[in-house]
Amino acid sequence: MSIFTEQKNRWLDENDLAFCIDQVGYEVSPGHCLVCPKREVRTVLDMSDDEWLACLDLIRSAVGRNPADGYNIGVNCGEYAGQSIMHAHIHVIPRYAGDDTNPRGGVRAVIPGKKSYGG
């Protein structure tokens, strides 16, 4: 059992195949949550099509609960991509005007120095 499934009291929402868990104490921004399949698979690449659809439903629900100016929705697949808990999960990170003086490049920022598109 993973840390996500062990902490059912932190689940914000669920459906037959997936759940959404808060990131209080670990949040990148207010409203940051994770969407996970209930079946414990290592990465989202191991999820079934039905699990993907179930997760998409909960991502949309999370966005509806946390109105923001934008969102980063992303995954880390494997240790070298930064995944630290080996139970597939999708980050839903609300973004707010002014939280970054230059948000252009978004998820490209996972590699230091690669956020900018220019030379």
Image: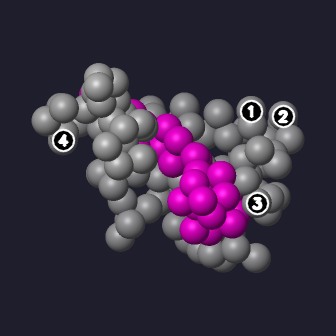
* Alpha-carbon span between mark 1 and mark 4: 30 Å
* Residue 82 position in % (x across, y down): 54, 59
Q: Residues within 10 Å of mark 2 (few under 14, many from 20)?
A: few
Pick the front one: 49 or 80: 80
Kindly report which numbered mark, 3 or 1, lies closer to the viewer in this rendering: 3
* Alpha-carbon span between mark 3 and mark 2: 15 Å
Q: Secondary structure at mark 2?
A: helix
User: Can you identify the residue that label 4 sits on?
Assistant: 99
* Alpha-carbon span between mark 3 and mark 1: 18 Å
**Pointers 3 and 1 in contact (C-beta within 8 Å):** no
Q: Quadrant of the N terminus?
A: bottom right
User: Can you identify the residue that label 3 sits on?
Assistant: 42
Q: Is residue 103 left or right of residue 93?
A: left
User: Can you identify the residue that label 1 sits on?
Assistant: 53
Pick the front one: 82 or 86: 82
- Quarter of the figure with residue 52: top right
Does the stretch in magenta take in 89? yes
Kindly report which numbered mark, 3 or 2, lies closer to the viewer in this rendering: 3
In the rendered image of this protein, does residue 79 appear above or below residue 67? below
Identify the residue at horizontal 60%, vertical 59% (top origin).
80
* Alpha-carbon span between mark 3 and mark 4: 31 Å
**Pointers 4 and 2 in contact (C-beta within 8 Å):** no
Mark earlier in primary sequence (3, 4): 3
Name of the residue lying farthest toward the front: 119
In the rendered image of this protein, does residue 28 appear above or below residue 104? below
**Pointers 1 and 2 in contact (C-beta within 8 Å):** yes
Highlighted range, magenta: 68-93
In the rendered image of this protein, does residue 2 appear above or below residue 117? below
Mark earlier in primary sequence (1, 4): 1
User: Can you identify the residue that label 2 sits on?
Assistant: 49
Q: Residues within 10 Å of mark 4 (few under 14, many from 20)?
A: few
Amino acid at circle 3: Arg
